[in-house]
Image (spheres, helix red, strand yellow):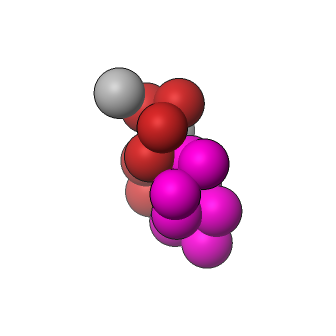
Amino acid sequence: MKTQAVLYNPGQVAGEI
């Protein structure tokens, strides 16, 4: 669920992608 992770953690986008 990379997409949801980005939506909930916009600050950790670089770490989630």
Provide the residue span drawn in magenta: 6-13
Q: Total label count?
A: 0
The residue at 52%/57% (across/down) is 8
The answer to which of 17 and 8 lies nearer the viewer is 8
1 is higher (above) or lower (below) than 4: above
The answer to which of 16 and 9 lies nearer the viewer is 9
12 is higher (above) or lower (below) than 15: below
Residue 1 lies left or right of residue 10; in this view the side is left
Q: Residue furthest bottom?
A: 11
The residue at 35%/27% (across/down) is 1
Counting from the top left corner in percent of width and height, residue 12 is at 52, 65
11 is higher (above) or lower (below) than 5: below
The answer to which of 13 and 9 lies nearer the viewer is 9
Magenta includes 9?
A: yes
Counting from the top left corner in percent of width and height, residue 16 is at 43, 47
The residue at 60%/48% (across/down) is 7
